[in-house]
Image (cartoon, rainbow, N blue to C red):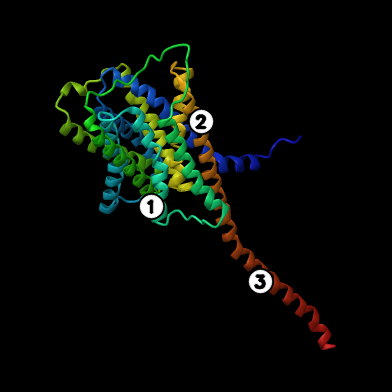
Amino acid sequence: MAPPRASETGGVWSRYAPHVLMALTQLCYTLMYFITEAAFNRGLNPYVYVTYRHLLVAVLLWPFAYYHEKKLRPKMTLMLFLEIFVLSLLGVSLTLNMYFASLRYTSPTFVTSMVNTIATITFVIAIILRMEIVDVKSLRGLAKIAGTVVSFVGVTTMTLYKGAAITSLWKSPIHIQGGSVAHEGWMKGSVLAVASCICWSIWYIMQASSLKRYPAQLSLTVWMSMVGGIQSTAFTVFMQHKPEDWLIGFGLKFWCIVYSGLACNGFTVFVQLWCTEKKGPVFVTMFNPLTTIMVAILAYFIFGENLYVGSIIGGVVVILGLYMLLWGKEKDQEHGASKEQEPELDCEKQAKVSDDYAVQNETEAPKTIK
């Protein structure tokens, strides 16, 4: 059997690179969940954590963005800066601070499950803004709708139905300490969680249009991290009154911020911007449920937590829904590419007919002279 050609290998990679990279970003977020969970239990302030991780990635990535994208980076204008300011507010400071604030009034299970609704919210917003076209008469359009619904059902199943527990042989050394706020704050926490998901969805939608005006993806990542870090600093100073919260030392808190900054603000945001440009915002958000599945798997096999039947069933349903939507998106792109090629083929056919007609006239001309 002959080995695959380099061109074929490159074609396969270019086709599935967004899928692989988005799965890798979810793995980065999964590891961040456990590291951050442990750091919060050691006393790391969530608002300080959000501030430090974004300022860190801005400082570390700035030299690379400055030299690597000198020719690609457009000139900064007031309107462009205001757009970046809004992007930073929706995707960094406001969203993450609301997310961690909601943990004080609800539960980690509720909040992490709400994050998985971002794909559905983004899909609906994209349809309203006509960024996502759904042909309900075609199989690919029905697959996109059904995939979104099925994925949401799977996440809901994982959240609301536990079922029988598959007991682990050891106990998890990491637990999130519950908040001391009374249950009457549940509605407030729910509103904060929903608001953070809506902000995230709008952020994904805005990225698609912002990349057209600011195509330097690495520089845009640095700008959002820096502006978002400054916004979060102002928010933290306003909300907190303990100067000692800013002292983190060089232990677990420090490495948690370093990992989150480099992996989850540097690498993942850059990958998401690239995938948004290639595949669109809905494609990017549909990988969010994978984090829930990866967390359940790592929690059982590595951290010794129980695995419930509901989590297994819900995980399978989420993967099924994700596959259905991605299949619909893939068929949409193939259909769009074929429609773009049709005018070119028509032009080629017309040119060929004209050439044949010219050749025929040239061959018949001498006969007429005779």
Residue that sits furthest to the left in the current view: 241
Q: Residue at x 26, y 49 (%)?
A: 82
Question: x%, y% of residue 111?
Answer: 34, 32
Q: Nearer the viewer, mark 2 or mark 1?
A: 2
Element under disc 1: helix
Give 304 or 94, whichever is nearer the viewer. Answer: 304
Give the residue type at disc 3.
Gln
Is any atom of residue 93 visible in this view? no
Quadrant assignment for the N terminus: top right
State yes or no: discs 1 and 3 in contact (Cβ < 8 Å). Answer: no
Give the residue type at disc 1.
Ser
Q: CA distance from mark 2 to mark 1?
A: 37 Å
Residue indicated by mark 1: 209
Residue 265, image quadrant: top left
Residue indicated by mark 2: 313
Q: Dot 3: few (<14), some (14–19), or many (≥20) neighbours within 10 Å?
A: few
Give 6 or 209, whichever is nearer the viewer. Answer: 209
Question: x%, y% of residue 78?
Answer: 25, 52
Q: Dot 1: few (<14), some (14–19), or many (≥20) neighbours within 10 Å?
A: some
Quadrant assignment for the C terminus: bottom right
Lower position in the chain sequence, tag 1 or tag 3: 1
Check the image and report above or below for 61 versus 332.
above
Q: Residue at x 44, y 31 (%)?
A: 158
